[in-house]
Image (cartoon, rainbow, N blue to C red):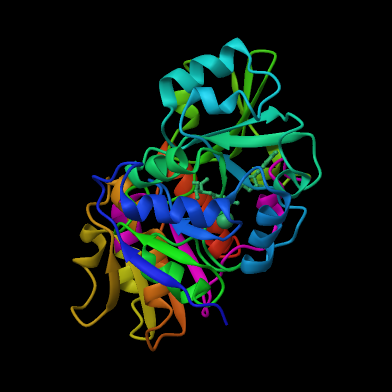
Amino acid sequence: MMHTKRVVVSTQVTAEDATVRYAAALLRAGELVAFPTETVYGLGADGLSEAAARAVYTAKGRPSDNPLILHVDGREMLTGVAAQVSTLEERLIHDFWPGPLTLVFPKTAAVPESVTGGGDTVAVRSPRHPVALALIRAAGVPIAAPSANRSGRPSPTTAEMVCHDLTGRIALVLDAGPCTVGVESTVAACSDGRITIYRPGAVTAEMLSAYGPVTLDPALSGAGIPKAPGMKYRHYSPRVPVTIWQGDGAAVARSLKAHYRGDCGYFVSRETAALLPPEAHTFIWGARADCQAMAHGLYAALTVLEQLPITEIYAEGVAARELGAAIMNRLAKAAGYHIKEVK
Ligand code: TXA
Ligand code: MG
C-alpha cells in the first residue's frame, strides 16, 4: 500500500511556496495529488499525461469511459487544450472564471485519450480556490481532476472525506479545510449561441440565461442518455434509504413532525428542526432559505447521518431553481428518486 501524506496548507499560498512546489513536482512525476477547489476536493493528475490520467481511474475505481475535467489557471492555458473557443464561450469565461463553470470544447491533439474517455471533446474549468490555482500554476500544465472520492461514494468536501476514501492509493492530500460551495461545478456546452447544461451547479441556469437561450440536457429529467457520461452512473446512496419530503417549507415541517420517527436521521433546515423532538438525529444545514448553506452541508450530512443508529434518512427538499436545482439533482440521486410530495 502506498503511503499517503496529508499536509495542511493555508489559503494564502502561492505557486512559489515549498508545499505547492512539492505537490506540483509529484504531479509532474505522474503521481496523484488530492487538492481543494471551491466546489469539492479534486483528485489531480498531470492532465497532459496519458499514463497519469489513467492512474486516476485505477485509484477511484472509475469506469474509463467517464471523462475527466481539466483544470486550468486561466484563459491562456485553455489555448493548449481547446481547439476552438466561440464568442459566447469567451464571454462566459470572462465572467465566470475562475469559478464553478466547466465548459466542453473540441479538444486539441495535446489532450490524452485517457482524459476524454476516447471522445473528441474536453471539459475544462478554472477553479476559484487559491490552493488549486497555485498548484496548477506551479505544475505549469492543466490538472485532470475528478472529485476525490472512490467511485460510488459522495464527493468529498473535506480532506477527512478524501483520506477516508483514498488513503493508501495516492501520494498526497493538500488540506485547506472544507470547500465553500459543496456541490460539483456546472457542466455546460455552447453551440450556435445556445447553452446546454449537462450537470447543474453553482453557476445556475438563471445566471447563464443572460448570455443566450439555456436548455437542460433532457437526460437530467430521466429521458435518454446523458451528455455528461458521469451522470448516467449510479451515484452515492447512503447505507440506509433516503426519502425527500418536497413541498411548501412550513407544510413539510409539519408533516415531518407528524410522522416523526426516532429511528430516522433528518437533513433539515433550522425551522423544521425546531418542530422535531430535541433528541431527533438531525443534521441542520441552517436557515431554510439559505441554499448555499444547504449545498455546503449536503455531502457531509449524508455521510454523517448514515453512521448513526438509524434505518432511514428523511431530507427536506427545496425548490429546484437556482442553486436549489443542483442540490435537488444530487439529493434525488442519493434518494434513488424517492420523493414524497407534501401538500
Ligand atoms: O466541481 C467539479 O467539477 C469537481 C472539482 C474537482 O473540479 N470535479 C468533478 O469531476 O466533479 P467529476 O469527474 O466527478 O465529474 C466530471 C463530470 C462528469 O459528469 C463527466 O461525465 C463530465 O463532467 N464530463 C467530463 N468531460 C466531459 C465531456 N467531454 N463531455 C461531457 N461531459 C463531460
Ligand atoms: Mg464525481
Q: Is residue 242 depicted above or below 253 in this figure?
A: below
Quadrant in which the C terminus appears:
bottom left
* 306, 260: nearer the viewer: 306
- At horizontal 30% and vertical 48% (from top left) the residue drawn is 17
- Specify the quadrant of the image occupied by residue 324: top left
In this rendering, the count of numbered labels is 0
* 98, 216: nearer the viewer: 98
Quadrant in which the N terminus appears:
bottom right
Q: Which residues are magenta?
A: 225-253
- Specify the quadrant of the image occupied by residue 262: bottom left
Residue 318 in view (yes/no): yes
- Outermost top residue: 87
The percent coordinates of residue 311 (x first, y second) are 46, 85
Does 281 sit left or right of 244 as displayed? left
Residue 209 in view (yes/no): no
The percent coordinates of residue 91 (x first, y second) are 50, 14
Q: Is residue 88 depicted above or below 289 in this figure?
A: above
- At horizontal 55% and vertical 77% (from top left) the residue drawn is 2
User: Which corner quadrant of the figure contains ligand 2?
Assistant: bottom right
Does 53 sit left or right of 35 as displayed? right
User: Is 239 colored magenta in this rendering?
Assistant: yes
Q: Is residue 36 depicted above or below 14 in this figure?
A: below
The percent coordinates of residue 315 (x first, y second) are 41, 64
- At horizontal 53% and vertical 75% (from top left) the residue drawn is 241
- Specify the quadrant of the image occupied by residue 152: bottom right
Does 94 sit left or right of 274 as displayed? right
The percent coordinates of residue 292 (x first, y second) are 31, 46
